């Protein structure tokens, strides 16, 4: 699979900081299907095209500010159809998402990738908008917790992505220098936060943001699939 940009590495990379939603699990197709299912429970009809267009319009209009709250798309579509029960819609969205994640599990590909990276000496962590309670439950359920030395969520930070602070905390947990680390994510805030913290950055455009938008935010490299990450880093 083609890698689109060179990754200049003055020092060997030793630490990897991942985003979670849209990077380690899920893509825009999954988010849209969950939105459709969620609104269907309220007897509201929405097409995948409408959900995707709303997300893209928020990005084009500058309202997204480098990140998309997927549950917020469901809430906005519900409001457009006259349903103003925001918290109920948001709660139902996460229920549907959790059910899907329970059904699918992490997938053999993800476990294999994390295992290969760990066996090759990489230290790994997470910086994610997923709240601590949900993230801890998910990592425990999927038995992935041992792969990550650090898991940083917004719960204990006044500033989060694209602030460098959560990335610097993860790097400190790694006992590495920023230039020895790389951030992997699907949104501009991942690229911006990593760059501001002094890391390398790899964009994975499988969410609502395009390759061009990740490059504009400072991605050093674009990969089309997480499956190619080990081969890129082992060079």
Image: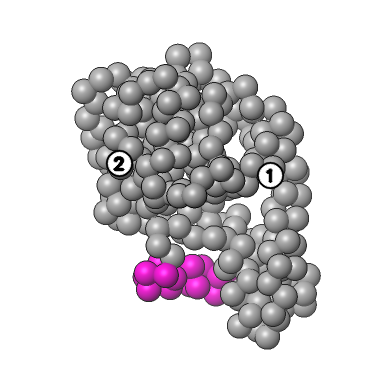
| Image coords of residue 38 (percent x, y) | 72, 66
Q: Nearer the viewer, residue 83 or 108?
A: 83
Residue name at image x 30 percent, y 41 percent: 195
Say whether residue 206 is magenta.
no
Residue name at image x 72 percent, y 38 percent: 137
Say whether residue 51 is magenta.
yes
Residue name at image x 63 percent, y 80 percent: 79
Q: Quadrant of residue 64?
A: bottom left
The residue tagged 1 is 134
Q: Are marks 1 and 2 in contact (CB under 8 Å)?
A: no
Q: Which residues are magenta?
A: 48-63
| Image coords of residue 37 (percent x, y) | 71, 65
Which SS class for mark 2?
helix
The residue tagged 2 is 195
Count the numbered circles shown: 2
Local crowd size for mark 2, using a 10 Å CA cut-off: few (<14), some (14–19), many (≥20): many
Question: In screen coordinates, is 52 left or right of 204?
Answer: right
Above or below 160: residue 11: above
Q: Is residue 49 visible?
A: no
Which SS class for mark 1?
helix
Q: Nearer the viewer, residue 61 or 151?
A: 151
| Image coords of residue 68 (percent x, y) | 49, 60
Colouring style = one colour
Q: CA distance from mark 1 to mark 2?
A: 27 Å
Above or below 2: residue 82: below
Question: In screen coordinates, is 147 left or right of 207?
Answer: right
In terms of secondary structure, what is the magenta stretch mainly?
helix
């Amino acid at each position: 699979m083609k890698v689109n940009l060179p990754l200049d590495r003055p020092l060997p990379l030793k630490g990897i900081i991942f985003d979670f939603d849209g990077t380690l699990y899920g893509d825009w197709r999954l988010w849209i299907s969950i939105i459709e299912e969620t609104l269907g429970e309220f007897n509201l009809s929405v097409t995948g095209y409408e959900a995707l267009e709303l997300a893209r319009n928020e990005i084009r209009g500058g309202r997204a500010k480098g990140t998309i709250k997927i549950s917020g798309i469901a809430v906005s579509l519900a409001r457009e159809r006259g349903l103003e029960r925001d918290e109920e819609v948001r709660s139902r969205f996460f229920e549907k998402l959790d059910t899907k994640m329970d059904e699918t599990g992490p997938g053999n590909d993800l476990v294999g990738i994390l295992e290969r990276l760990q066996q090759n000496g990489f230290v790994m962590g997470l910086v994610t908008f997923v709240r601590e309670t949900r993230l801890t439950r998910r990592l425990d359920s999927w038995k992935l917790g041992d792969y990550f030395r650090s898991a940083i969520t917004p719960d204990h930070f006044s500033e989060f992505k694209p602030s460098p602070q959560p990335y610097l905390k993860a790097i400190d947990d790694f006992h590495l220098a920023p230039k020895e680390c790389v951030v992997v994510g699907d949104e501009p805030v991942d690229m911006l936060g990593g760059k501001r913290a002094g890391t390398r950055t790899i964009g994975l455009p499988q969410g609502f943001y395009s390759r061009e938008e990740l490059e504009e935010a400072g991605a050093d490299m674009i990969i089309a699939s997480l499956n190619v990450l080990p081969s890129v880093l082992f060079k």
